[in-house]
């Protein structure tokens, strides 16, 4: 009897061993591993080796209680048998984070890696992370071990499924049909954004304005978001994110809120919100900072493993806050900002808001899971969101183009106003000169009449007073000749720029010239100005001459201390004629490739001003000019003489012709200031 029981038990054990296997050729389409008696499972730490698993004896029936997490892995084992005389192919389907398959071969176990977070170059089937192909030799029976692991702290049970080759091909064919339209839209979205971003990047480098930087950041992170979404599709072209799946998964939410932050800053500059409502502009800036901060915090927290449910709830909460706030700011901008581009903002923001709200509703309410529903297609929530974004981008691209047109129009208006102002300044200058001549003549006649009536005993004192006043008036007359002389030269330069069709240079020249003219007019009524003020006028003048002469002309200004220069007074526009003469009669006729001018203000002892050029020198200049001499320089010399008499100061002028091996090499003008 005892022998009969033992024989029966051995028979049952052998029968169980034969039945505890899966015949690959018997799989019609698919075969679920969960709940099958042929499949056993156990839990272990995530880093346990296959050798230890093979030796383990704590196997149990595989059911839904076996779930993988970041700290624990789920192992399962079963036998696969190919009873046919041909090589048989079967496929394991798994949509979780990581799956490691160990299939018994004659020389050991063959290791296959796959899963959502496996880089594309590590997957055995590059077209999809879902399937792993297993090849069984004829009449082969192989032990198969599967390890399931996860990047999340806790997720629901995701079980592998066995597919036959027929079932695999049918599944992939259906998936391809479902994904064709979504993938095509994603490619259209990506290509559109990349083309627009390329143009915006060119404008960033050419114009160097913040608005283009913000718009490029807005487009760039939309492109990053699109690549992340494309990763979860069977697309093989431009699927760059599949090479970095874990990083891409972390950056999805970060990319969305980063481009929202750039979008807010872009809108703030596009509509010039600060001009209409300063409080609104500050609010938008704070909102952008919040979006950037959330994006960074989201990335950081998830990098260190935040629970899946916490991530899901944070997504819901942040959208419940951001979307109403976005709607509130939308109406605030409409109410406060009166900008010609506001209509583009309204349309674009409306499309974005509709896409965002509808996408959130579809995803969190499960409308994308309703059978035969309008939103039941792959990545419906992402497609809806992208459609809203694409409409918004097109609106803002048109708005950006129109803003460039408006800026150009404003520049033309400003240029016309500057030209009109210059013409008015010319008329004003002519009238002022005539009026000044008239006043001088009247004063001279009055002084002559008074002088004839002065008593003889006061003749010497009154004669001295008369001479001082006469010298002052001569200085005014000389100054009135100085201003139109310089204006004539500057207007000729402006005319040359216009004739050469250098419109932008002409406009910039007008800006600097108007500023210089204003300084000249302000100082024209003064008997003296500080050397520091004269230096500021010279800097403006030299910048104008630099633009006229081009890159072969360069100048250097050396000054020990501008503060010390403010302690010395000189007649207005004393130095400018010497500088002008050095440029146009010394440097301009020179054939030297480098034309240099230096101005040195030496305050180590007494003030000494040195103006030196490497031009042709006075001798060659006199040959070119023949009998003509610079009127501005002669006037300045006379003004210097008169100023020494009136102000009781002694400014000495010396002009030295520089030579190099007997050849003229330039001119040095030195003005020494003695109290």
Image (cartoon, rainbow, N blue to C red):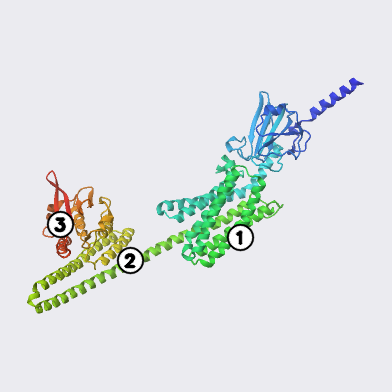
Percent coordinates x, y for residue 348 in the rendering: 54, 60
Q: According to the image, label 1 marks what residue? A: 324
Q: According to the image, label 2 marks what residue? A: 418
Q: Above or below — where is 217 with respect to 507?
A: above
Could you tell me which residue is drawn at 13 percent across and 76 percent down? Answer: 447
* Left or right, residue 559 beside residue 4: left
C-alpha gap between disc 3 and disc 1: 77 Å
> 10 Å neighbourhood of mark 1: few (<14), some, or many (≥20)?
few
For the view shown, which residue lies furthest in the left direction? 456
Q: Name the front one of labels 3 and 1.
A: 3
Secondary structure type for disc 2: helix
Image quadrant containing the N terminus: top right
Could you tell me which residue is drawn at 70 percent across and 31 percent down? Answer: 145
Q: According to the image, label 3 marks what residue? A: 652
Percent coordinates x, y for residue 41 in the rendering: 74, 34
Q: Are marks 2 and 1 in contact (CB under 8 Å)?
A: no
First in sequence: mark 2 or mark 1?
A: 1
Percent coordinates x, y for residue 211 in the rendering: 46, 56
C-alpha gap between disc 3 and disc 2: 40 Å
């Amino acid at each position: 009897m005892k022998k009969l029981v033992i024989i029966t038990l051995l028979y049952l054990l052998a029968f169980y061993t034969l039945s505890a296997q899966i015949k690959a050729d018997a799989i019609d389409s698919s075969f679920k591993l969960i709940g099958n008696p042929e499949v056993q499972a156990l839990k272990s730490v995530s880093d346990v080796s296959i050798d230890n698993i093979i030796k383990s004896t704590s196997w149990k029936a595989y059911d839904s209680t076996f779930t993988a997490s970041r700290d624990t892995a789920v192992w399962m084992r079963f036998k696969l048998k190919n009873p046919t005389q041909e090589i048989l192919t079967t496929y394991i389907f798994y949509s979780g984070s990581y799956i490691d398959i160990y299939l018994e071969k004659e020389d050991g176990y063959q290791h296959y890696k796959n899963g959502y977070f496996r880089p594309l170059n590590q997957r055995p089937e590059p077209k999809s992370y879902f399937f792993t192909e297993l090849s069984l030799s004829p009449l082969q029976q192989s032990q198969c071990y599967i390890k399931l692991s996860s990047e999340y702290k806790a997720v629901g049970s995701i079980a592998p499924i066995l597919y036959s080759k027929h079932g695999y091909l049918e599944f992939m064919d259906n998936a391809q049909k479902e994904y064709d339209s979504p993938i095509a839209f994603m490619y259209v979205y990506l290509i559109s954004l990349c083309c627009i971003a390329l143009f915006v990047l060119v404008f960033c480098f050419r114009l160097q304005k913040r608005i283009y930087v913000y718009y490029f950041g807005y487009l760039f992170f939309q492109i990053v978001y699109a690549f992340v979404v494309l990763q979860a599709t069977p697309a093989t072209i431009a699927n760059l994110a599949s090479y970095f799946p874990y990083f891409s998964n972390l950056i999805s939410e970060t990319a969305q809120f980063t481009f929202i932050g750039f979008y807010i800053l872009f809108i703030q500059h596009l509509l010039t919100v600060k001009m209409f409502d300063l409080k609104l502009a500050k609010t938008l800036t704070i909102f952008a900072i919040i979006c950037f901060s959330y994006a960074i915090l989201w990335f950081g927290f998830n990098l260190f493993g935040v629970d899946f449910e916490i991530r899901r709830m944070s997504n819901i909460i942040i959208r419940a806050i951001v979307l109403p706030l976005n709607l509130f700011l939308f109406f605030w901008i409409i109410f406060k900002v009166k900008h010609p581009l506001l209509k583009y903002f309204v349309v674009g923001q409306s499309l974005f808001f509709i896409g965002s709200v509808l996408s959130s509703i579809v995803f969190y309410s499960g409308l994308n899971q309703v059978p035969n529903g309008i939103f039941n297609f792959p990545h419906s929530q992402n497609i809806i969101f992208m459609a809203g974004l694409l409409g918004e981008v097109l609106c803002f691209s048109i708005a950006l183009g129109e803003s460039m047109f408006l800026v150009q129009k404003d520049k033309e208006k400003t240029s016309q106003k500057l030209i009109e102002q210059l013409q008015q300044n010319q008329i004003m200058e002519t009238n002022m000169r005539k009026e000044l001549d008239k006043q001088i003549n009247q004063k001279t006649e009055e002084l002559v009449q008074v002088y004839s009536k002065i008593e003889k005993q006061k003749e010497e004192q009154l004669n001295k007073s008369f001479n001082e006043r006469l010298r002052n008036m001569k200085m005014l007359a000389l100054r009135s000749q100085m201003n139109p002389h310089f204006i004539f030269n500057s207007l000729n330069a402006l005319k040359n720029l216009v004739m050469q069709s250098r419109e932008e240079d002409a406009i910039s020249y007008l800006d600097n010239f108007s500023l210089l003219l204003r300084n000249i007019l302000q100082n024209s009524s003064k008997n003296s100005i500080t050397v520091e003020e004269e230096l500021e006028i010279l800097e403006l003048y030299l910048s104008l001459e630099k633009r006229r002469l081009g890159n072969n002309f360069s100048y250097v200004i050396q000054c020990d201390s501008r503060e010390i220069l403010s302690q010395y007074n000189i007649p207005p526009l004393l130095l400018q004629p010497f500088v002008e003469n050095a440029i146009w009669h010394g440097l301009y006729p020179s054939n030297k490739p480098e034309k240099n001018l230096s101005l040195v203000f030496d305050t180590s002892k007494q003030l000494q001003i040195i103006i030196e050029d490497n031009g042709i020198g006075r001798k060659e200049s006199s040959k070119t000019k023949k009998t003509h001499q610079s009127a501005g320089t002669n006037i300045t010399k006379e003004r210097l003489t008169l100023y020494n008499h009136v102000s009781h100061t002694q400014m000495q002028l010396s002009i030295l012709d520089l030579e190099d091996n007997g050849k003229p090499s330039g001119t040095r003008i030195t003005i020494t200031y003695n109290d």
